[in-house]
Image: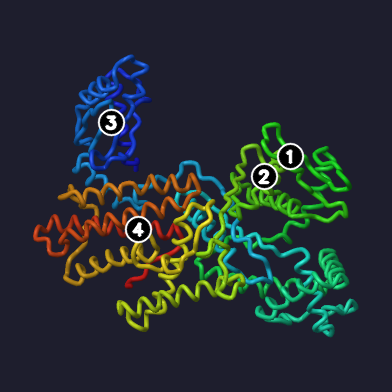
Amino acid sequence: MKKLIEVIQDEMVKAFTAAGMDASFARVSVSNRPDLCEYQCNGAMAAAKTYHKAPIQIAETVVSAVEDHSVIGEIKAVKPGFINMKINPAFLAEYLSDMQKDPDLSVEKTTNPKTILVDYGGANVAKPLHVGHLRSAIIGESIKRMGRFMGHHMIGDVHLGDWGLQMGLIITELRERRPDLVYFDENYEGEYPKEAPFTISELEEIYPCASGKSKEDEAYKERALNATLELQQGRRGYRALWNHIMHVSVTDLKKNYDNLDVHFDLWKGESDVQEYIPGMVDYLRDNGYAHYDQGALVVDVKEESDTKEIPPCMILKSDGAALYDTTDLATIIERMKLYHPDEICYVVDKRQELHFIQCFRCARKTRLVDEDTVLTFIGFGTMNGKDGKPFKTREGGVMRLERLIGEINEEMYQKIVENRSVKDTDARGTAAIVGLSAIKYGDLSNQASKDYVFDVDRFTSFEGNTGPYILYTIVRTKSILERYAKEGGKLKKGEILAPAGESEKSLMLSVSRFNGVVENAFEEKAPHKICAYIYELANEFNHFYHETKILSEEDQARKDSYLALLDLVREVLETCIDLLGFSAPERM
């Protein structure tokens, strides 16, 4: 379906053309003065210069050229030259009725589906997820869901940190603790055990211990570096240990991401692209893209228009070791080869922007991507505590994501029990659903690039701009529909009448904007725009609900219309929260 504002603009194009003026002046916007009108056109102000007439004269001529008022019910020319409009209530009702009959709720799917690979998550193997991993996971998940809803082929890749010194550290520490393990016997030729010689909790304790030792003991660090090299060169025992580390760690990561309702299509990591690095290095060197600078192999990526220094992209260190630049460029090669994406979108900490500028420029300059491949960097800000510093535990340590989710769920559970709105047997499950909305909405309602304060008390509130408030509104719509069904009523979808009052019309106008909001939010990779929309929609619905007797309405046709509208509000809200990555319970 066409967006409602486009339908109104089509009518204004006809009017401007009929008045003998260029259609480009017929641009319509939602009014910033809803007390005066619903839509406005300021084209007469711009047209005054072209046609050498006073703006109010042009506006009056255009208004008089509108003959068919089936779409625009009221239209006025207002000094100094504004054109104020209100939509025909009957047309608005017809538009919403058609919207409810549409499986996509009026959203036009793209006619040019693209393959878009979203790199988000960025978890490190053998390390627990902590609050620093939260933003990448939920922003990326939302962008992926929005793209799928618009009809694109979206591929989500967690891009694990599963290679390098951290693996050598784990192997070295394990060897010190259990030197008798068969993995350390270089002469062993049999099958290695299928069960890992450690649990996830042991693994998560081993790494920080090893990391700490390496900073104090140079010999220990050398052993770890050597273990890393042997692993990368294919030593059998170390590869078998690495497979155990991967299996145990990824199983735990999947469980934690599942708790966040975040799901990846690909579980690839840095290890998957190691085979591409030698050929890439040869290609860059042999084709004159890379050169040696103080022993390091680099590609210059600075441009004349740069206002700040952009250092070269370093491909190999002077000792021949690969870096993040190397791995990320090799990852681009693999993605182009296997998936041929039209766009690769990276959802990472905004402090990594320089790194990605270097990588993107290098990939383009060296033709590692096609000319029309889009490389997008979505840098997110920091999640802070009330003190304005990065969010931590009360003890001052980095908070594990599992603990954060547990604390939020407990907070929601206590509130639900106090409200006595849900049976005790359902309270824990409901608390988990509502708790997730508090976390995700609390984060996503902020513009991704900005830092924000994670305020547990505010985010878990049932009032204000919060996830629980949105869910409470959805549950309210469900309970009304459920009561009507229990009374023997049958919902009549797509039979919405012209609004009977101003609060109903405001609600209908808010619902009608759904398609434009979703399209714009995906184009700008901006989940916060969906949050802003559903907060407005929830407020409009609650205003309508508090001043309208829905189930006690005596006029059956009017009651059917109220309920159809209410059900459409529910559908739109539930679709939006699914795009944000959470769902609503049946009761709260």
Query: Disc 4 vs disc 2: which is toward the camera?
Result: 2
Secondary structure category for the residue under label 3: helix
Real-space CA distance between mark 3 and mark 1, rounded to the nearest whole angstrom: 50 Å
Numbered circle sitting on residue 573 = 4
Label total for image? 4
Numbered circle sitting on residue 357 = 2
Q: In this view, does 320 lie to the left or right of 300?
A: right
Please, which residue is most extreme toward the front here?
Answer: 387
Label 3 sits on residue: 11
Q: What residue type is labelled 3?
A: Glu
Specify which label sits upstream in the sequence, 2 or 1.
Answer: 1
Real-space CA distance between mark 4 and mark 2, rounded to the nearest whole angstrom: 37 Å
Specify which label sits upstream in the sequence, 4 or 2.
Answer: 2
Real-space CA distance between mark 3 and mark 2, rounded to the nearest whole angstrom: 45 Å
Query: Disc 1 vs disc 4: which is toward the camera?
Result: 1
User: 72 or 58, which lies in front?
Assistant: 58
Colour mapping: rainbow
Label 1 sits on residue: 301
Secondary structure category for the residue under label 4: helix
Specify which label sits upstream in the sequence, 3 or 1.
Answer: 3
Q: Which residue is drawn at 51% across and 45% down?
A: 113
The crowding category of the residue bearing disc 1, from other C-alpha atoms within 10 Å (few below 14, some 14 to 19, many at least 20), is some
Q: Which amino acid does label 4 sit on?
A: Leu
Real-space CA distance between mark 2 and mark 1, rounded to the nearest whole angstrom: 9 Å
The image position of residue 188, as x and y in percent, is 87, 79
Cβ atoms at labels 3 and 4 below 8 Å apart: no
Q: What residue type is labelled 2?
A: Ile
Cβ atoms at labels 2 and 1 below 8 Å apart: yes
Residue 463 quadrant: bottom left
The crowding category of the residue bearing disc 2, from other C-alpha atoms within 10 Å (few below 14, some 14 to 19, many at least 20), is some
Secondary structure category for the residue under label 1: loop
Cβ atoms at labels 4 and 2 below 8 Å apart: no
